Image (spheres, rainbow, N blue to C red):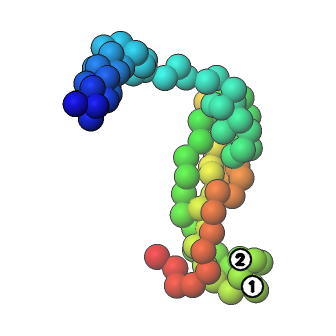
Amino acid sequence: MRVQGVLGLLSMGLFALGCGGVDTEVPVDETVATQDQALYDCEPGDEGYPVWECTQIDECGGRWGNLMRYYCYSPSTGGYYPGGVITYNCGDCY
């Protein structure tokens, strides 16, 4: 009898939680977007694109590897400029 009472309370609690107890949408944090932009070194208002490059990498002892760099596009000048490095891996280029 005691088990049924506990199960009943537990199911009622879960039912109440499913009826609007938790918001399903998470608000966008503007500071996170600003930090991501600063992370890749693009100027405010410029757009960035990740690009894989095959290049010699200092962290790989000067050997060749794959480097993902952020390239920024400036709508005001119509040009691209290199932003920050996102990641790299040593080894065969692809």
11 above or below 61? Answer: above
Q: Toward which corner of the image does residue 72 lie, by quadrant?
A: top right
Q: Toward which corner of the image does residue 62 lie, by quadrant?
A: bottom right
Report x, y in % for residue 64. Answer: 63, 83
Taking the view exactly as shown, the residue that stands out farthest to the top is 20
80 above or below 35? Answer: below
User: Could you say which disc has been placed on residue 62 in the image?
Assistant: 1
Visible residue check, residue 70: yes
Count of labels in the image: 2
Q: Residues within 10 Å of mark 2 (few under 14, many from 20)?
A: some
- In this rendering, position of residue 84 left or right of residue 89: right
Secondary structure state at the residue bearing disc 1:
loop
| Mark 2 and mark 1: Cα distance apart in space | 5 Å
Q: What residue sits 69% from the left and 79% below the top?
A: 56
Find disc 2 in the rendering and name its residue.
Answer: 57
Circle 2/circle 1 CB separation < 8 Å: yes
Q: Residues within 10 Å of mark 1 (few under 14, many from 20)?
A: few
Report x, y in % for residue 47. Answer: 59, 36
Amino acid type at circle 1 is Gly
Report x, y in % for residue 89. Answer: 60, 74
